[in-house]
Amino acid sequence: MSKTSTKGIWKVISASSMGTMIEWYDFYIFGSLAVVISTKFFPNDNPTAAFLSTLATFAAGFVVRPFGALFFGRLGDIIGRKYTFMATLLLMGGSTFLIGCIPSYETIGFLAPLLVLILRLLQGLALGGEYGGAATYVAEHAPAGEKGYWTSWIQTTATVGLFISLMVILATKSVLSAEAFDLWGWRVPFWVSIVMVGVSYLIRKNMDESPVFAKAKKEGTTSTNPLKESFGNRYNLKFILLALFGATMGQGVVWYTGQFYAMSFMKTVMNVDSSQVDELLGIALLIGTPFFIVFGWLSDKIGRKYIMMFGMLLAILSYRPIYKAMYNTTDINQKTEIAENPRETTEKKADGSSVTTIQKKYTDGTTVIEKKTYMEKKDVQTSVSIQITPNDKWTLIFLVFIQVLFVTMVYGPIAAFLVEMFPTKIRYTSMSLPYHVGNGIFGGLLPAISTYFVSHAKTAGKADFYLDGLWYPIIIAGICFVIGMIYIDNKNKITHL
């Protein structure tokens, strides 16, 4: 490429990536703060039910993403890529800001979770139209033979969005007391998003339309009914189904296992201190993110299929050993408690309740803080927080990094893979649906389904209950691997571009 064209595509990538990063940031802060949110917008008399309800609300935003893909995909194929994903950006950002403004359950009752659900649905609809627009826009600017490399920069934005959300949360916690953060500080990351969205809007406002789409529109070859041409054409429908069941379904569960479920697992199953989880996850993401570019570039050289399939296979074979190692890292049953060390303090509250805090230390440096809240001598809530040692932290960083590496293998080439499957006039619509069904339905439901499996197995008394949540991603990725290996052609399709 010439220096001029390189400069031009970097401008395109910067504008597209920043908007996509912000939209993922908006989506991730809800998941990152799920434990806190469950106590604000849902009844707190049953913490487990409140947390599962929060995850279900989080999942609802993913479930509607395919509908957003259809709605905004159709607009993108009719009026253009630029204006469509500007609209999704504003809808997403506005919804996120408003979530941070909703009064708590104690203030407005069941209206609180209802408003959160509505705004989560709007977030999901917007995100359903965002990714397809950004990926298509970049791919249609990229030179032939380099689609994987250039679109892989878009893939990094989802991880960068999660990374920034963790950093904003950590920064907010560092400047506020624990009480202030729990009372109102958790809202700050939601409010911050509106500033980021405003900056991104100004950047996107000055972008030009995709040259490929502009040419098609000038020649009168754009689609007048993208939905009908995408799903009413049996030949195109076959490729949509193949993209879903042979690629994005498995990519979705690998993605959410390696990032969201790993985070949820450490916080709720392993009981690791929330700030420590955010910190170690942020480090693992920072180390792993460049590999999106590596595998995107490599897919231009050897094809998309085998990189994505190998990533799925590694995940299928490795998840149970990885999560067993993660759990054993903080399993206090395998540690030696300092017998003379336990400290117990009790604090009386103005409402008549009392909180008993028990702190235990172990010979390896691990600290366990258990809090029990009593109301009229009845234990109504117990929470456990484990503060891990530096050695354990780096062990967990390594184990999460391995999972992120699987993510980069399946996700790095996926944008180019999808764009190359469909012609210009219906590309936005056709590629958006399988992507968002794979990620929104199969991937988005993973935290709630896997957490339920773990809770059920624990109640049933299974010794390795913490591994039951992995059956969902392993089975889904396994089915996808078989279909992808049999039916996907490794030759990169560039005839449509």
Image: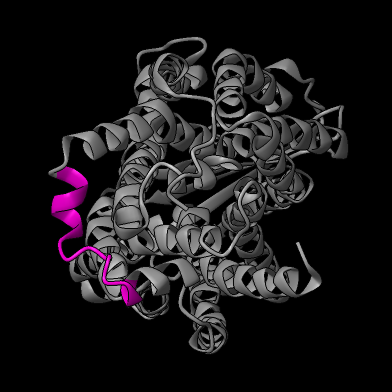
- Left or right: residue 264 versus residue 168 is left
**Image quadrant where residue 4 sits:** bottom right
Residue at 36% in and 38% down: 438
Compared with 18, 279 (above or below) is: above
- Left or right: residue 238 versus residue 305 is left
Tell me residue 460's x, y (percent): 35, 13
Tell me residue 465's x, y (percent): 47, 17
Residue at 42% in and 13% down: 486
Tell me residue 456's x, y (percent): 34, 22
Q: Residue furthest front?
A: 219
**Magenta highlight range:** 217-231
Residue at 52% in and 38% down: 255
Can residue 43 be seen in this snapshot?
A: no
- Left or right: residue 448 versus residue 356 is left
Q: Out of 236 and 392, give the one closest to the viewer.
A: 236
Residue at 57% in and 71% down: 181
Tell me residue 311's x, y (percent): 60, 25
Q: Out of 260 and 432, give the one closest to the viewer.
A: 432
Magenta stretch: includes residue 191:
no
Magenta stretch: includes residue 224:
yes
